Image: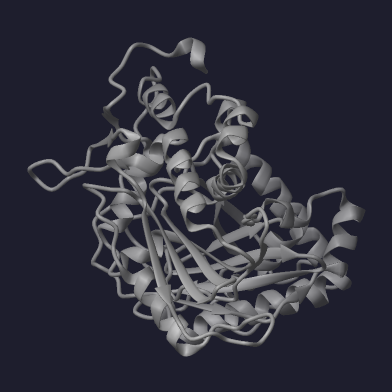
Amino acid sequence: MSSDMPSYDRVCFPLADPQRRLLGLLGTCADPSAYVSFLAHHVRGPLDLPRLRRAMDALTARHEPLRTAFPADEDGTVRRQCIEEPDAMPWELTVLDTPPVPSSPPPLHSEEDALLQGFARRAFDLARGPLARVLVVRRAAEDHLVVLAVHLLAADGWSLQILLDELGEYYADAGRATALLPPLDIQYADWAHWQAGRAARPEGPRIPARPVVGPGRRLRTAPVPVSAAERLARQEGVPLFTVLLTAFALAARGPAAPRVMVDVPVSGRDHPQLAVLAGYFTRFHRLAVSLPDDITFRQAMRRVQGAWAEAEETDAVFARPARPHTSTGLAPDSVLADGVPLFSYRASDVQPRLRLEGCSVTEADWLHNAAKVDLGLITDLVRDAVHPVLEFRPSVVPERVAERLGRNFAVLLEGAAADPDETVDPLEGGVP
């Protein structure tokens, strides 16, 4: 990629396509915090706050998106991004105290939850930056909650593990980490310029105007064992993702609408140099597949696998339609604003984890109650089960509709995957 780089402005430069789409969604969302990633951890041990501050500063110097602002033009439209020097945009580090909690592992109590919710609800100033901040809740001398908040414009899901790994390296020893971490060959600005300069590349579809949608909700549902799904995946020679996506597509199938569409986020990092960069690269593939009533789970999985291969081959970039699709099995009382539910899967080996030298760090059981989409299911693989989280906006999708989707997914993943050659009976009402 770097050999094709022309000379360009390294301070202010055009938006990349994923950023442009994300900014379009931000303009129609009543809760901008839905587009912020929150990583909460319990830290036991001698947490050194000055070392943490130095590590944050080193990370900001290394990754330009962490010190990038998005100023609006006179008409209020954001068309560019501007990089600041590291010392001009330090992260905010807030330290608050709460009464000690003696239990182990320490659960969140109401006062701490209120602190975290308040921290989450504070909007980022996109025009000024920075787009990352840290909250430290001190429960005792060696007992803390550490919460990292990063806006998606600065870091997508793939970026989070990069940032947490390198934050741990810098915390351990900034001098050693600098030596261990090879210099970045390119930055996000290079990729944005390269993308904008590709010849004969048609501009992607524009996101149509839509009314501002109400706040969203997130609900954890019960973990779903994947032993049957893993066994079926081995038989068919496909990744576990394919089995999970099949269960979701069947759960979204309506009784009178066998054609199902599902949006799936993908990393968008289609060049090796991008694998170590922080930034927002996420694209969306739209899966479209026909799943008639008399289909078996195995047959459905093979159709889904073929449809997914086609979506990958054509690199189907996500575009929100102007009107809801009526062919996705959605009933009139629960039509989505964009007509297509979202499915996201994250394997256990790519889930972000924080490590701080000299401390014991565990993930905190805290979930920010906001939704990026009208209806979606986010699944994390943890050992022998997936842990689903439902995202939905009650102003668009009733809670009972979202919960039914989650139940259907669990039933299919356990039951149909265990007996894949039986016809999959249409579940009650499909998604709606």
User: Which residue reaches farthest left?
Assistant: 74
Q: Is residue 218 left or right of residue 361?
A: left
State the scheme by which the image is colored. Answer: one colour
- Name the residue at 28% across, 48% down: 129
The residue lying toward the viewer, choosing from 72 and 341, is 72
The spot of residue 182 in percent (x, y) is 60, 26
Q: How many marks?
A: 0
Q: Where is residue 313? Give x, y as percent.
A: 62, 35
- Answer with the quarter of the image where residue 408 lies: bottom right
Q: Is residue 331 left or right of residue 421?
A: left
Left or right of 371 on screen, residue 355: right
Q: Is residue 156 left or right of residue 34?
A: right
Residue 26 versus residue 404 in the image, above or below:
above
Q: Is residue 169 above or below residue 408?
A: above
The residue sitting at 39% across, 17% down in the picture is: 199
Is 367 rendered above or below residue 167? below
- Seen from the viewer's position, the closer of residues 40 and 8 is 40
Q: Quadrant of residue 26?
A: bottom left
Evaluate whether residue 213 shows in this view: yes
Whether residue 205 is visible: no
At 80% from the left and 75% from the top, the residue drawn is 414
At a point 33% along the width and 71% down the height, the residue shown is 121
